[in-house]
Image (cartoon, rainbow, N blue to C red):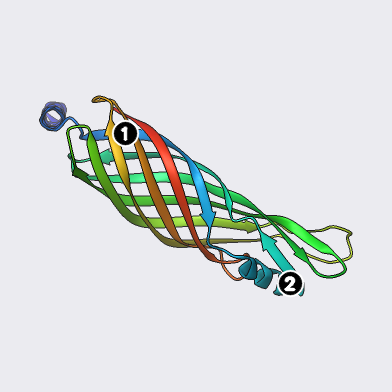
Amino acid sequence: MYKKAIAAAAFVFTSAAVHAQSADPKSGFYAGLDLGRSRLGVNADDIGGALANQGVAGTTDVDRTDTAFGVNGGYRFNSILGVEAAYERLGRFDYSADTGTDTISGKFRANALSLSVVGFYPLAPQWSLYGKAGVTRTDAKLDAASQNGTTAVDNSSHNGTGLLFGAGLTYDFDRSYFAKAGWDHYTKVGDNSTGSGPIDVYLLGVGVRF
């Protein structure tokens, strides 16, 4: 009896899912890859402050752009609403600090996991605007090394939560494949031990629907 009931429930659920997808060809699961350019909102003074917390004072310079890439997967309930989870490598940003007697150098590294609600606004059969908002779990690391070994410095790291906002444009090649161009804004990455600030990512992506 139970097996028949479970089988009947599964049949109803499957039929409903198939009907929903046939009614809206953009609904269902999808996965994608992103590649872009990131812009670090953590400036030289922020990193200099993190080094100052270790007793290192000096003039700091930082390269605030790098390559970003990530993977994402989600589910579209219909043509206008979906949810998305993603992992993004936000970048590895070189910096150096001149103390007068030594040079401290290293990288500010950041990654993020996110969960977002995504809304779509169809412009034409193949084109849509999208916007998204969600929460993030970020991992920031500040690597530090002394050039001549006379200054004692340590690597530092921070895991924290923040918000994610984004917007962009999608293009559907067909029912299965799509491309996008967009912007993601991570509101807060790092803390006083690493340097703290936002990161923006300008990206291109491709994806497939299942």
Which quadrant does the C terminus fall into? top left
> Can you tell which mark lies on residue 30?
1
Residue in the picture at 52% in, 65% down: 197
Where is residue 178 shown, x and y percent of the image?
Answer: 31, 31
Determine if residue 154 is in view. no
Label 2: how many Cα within 10 Å (few below 14, some 14–19, many 20+): few
Residue located beneath label 2 in the image: 54
Q: How many marks?
A: 2
Q: Quadrant of residue 29?
A: top left
Labels 1 and 2: the sequence-earlier one: 1
Q: CA distance from mark 1 to mark 2?
A: 45 Å
Where is residue 175 shown, x and y percent of the image?
Answer: 23, 25
Q: Quadrant of residue 169?
A: top left
Above/below status of 11 relative to 185? above
SS for dot 2: loop
* Left or right relative to 143: residue 29: left
Query: In front here: 3 or 86?
Result: 86
Residue flagged by tag 1: what amino acid is it? Tyr
Contact? badges 1 and 2 (CB < 8 Å): no
* Left or right relative to 36: residue 116: left
Residue in the picture at 46% in, 45% down: 87
Query: In front here: 28 or 146?
Result: 146
Residue flagged by tag 2: what amino acid is it? Gln
Residue in the picture at 76% in, 74% down: 57
Above/below status of 71 relative to 186? above
Above/below status of 68 relative to 11? below
Above/below status of 82 relative to 64? above
Label 1: how many Cα within 10 Å (few below 14, some 14–19, many 20+): some
Where is residue 61 shown, x and y percent of the image?
Answer: 69, 62
